[in-house]
Amino acid sequence: MEAHGFEKGWEIFEGKRDSIGLINQEKIKQLYTTYGYLGHKEVGEEASSNFWISIQHADNDVAFHQEMLRALKI
């Protein structure tokens, strides 16, 4: 913020945050394709919660959200 000012600093932050989110989203999709939904039984409670958090933040991919919700019901 000091180097770029508030508005530009926020814009830089959002870009980096979004790029990390997209990387995590791609990793989650790869894990799901390989192993299926990683729930409590498969990876334990904490890791399952971390898996779900990454899915929750995939707001840009509604079809992926819907697929994960169907998998979660199973």
Image (cartoon, rainbow, N blue to C red):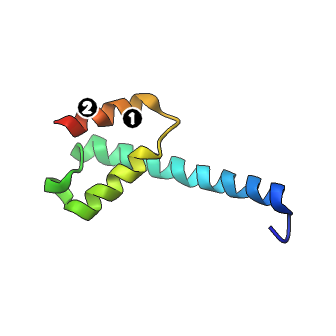
| Residue 38 - label | none
> Looking at the image, which is closer to me, 35 or 6?
6
SS for callout 2? helix
> Is 42 displayed left or right of 34 in the figure?
left
Q: Give how far across and how far down residue 18 sits, in percent.
A: 60, 49
Q: Earlier in the sequence, mark 1 or mark 2?
A: 1
> Looking at the image, which is closer to me, 37 or 9?
9
Dot 2 crowding, Cα within 10 Å, few <14, some 14–19, many 20+: few
> Looking at the image, which is closer to me, 70 or 25?
70
Residue appearing at x 23%, y 50% in the figure: 38
In the picture, residue 20 is in which quadrant?
Answer: bottom right
| Residue 70 - label | 2
SS for callout 1? helix
Mark 1 highlights which residue? 65
Going by the numbered disc 2, the residue's amino acid type is Arg
Quarter of the image with the C terminus in it: top left
Mark 1–mark 2 distance (CA, rounded to whole Å): 9 Å
Q: Give how far across and how far down residue 22 sits, in percent.
A: 53, 47
**Furthest-bottom residue in this view:** 2
Q: How many marks?
A: 2
Residue appearing at x 52%, y 51% in the figure: 21
**Furthest-front residue in this view:** 6
Residue appearing at x 61%, y 55% in the figure: 17
> Is 73 displayed left or right of 27 in the figure?
left
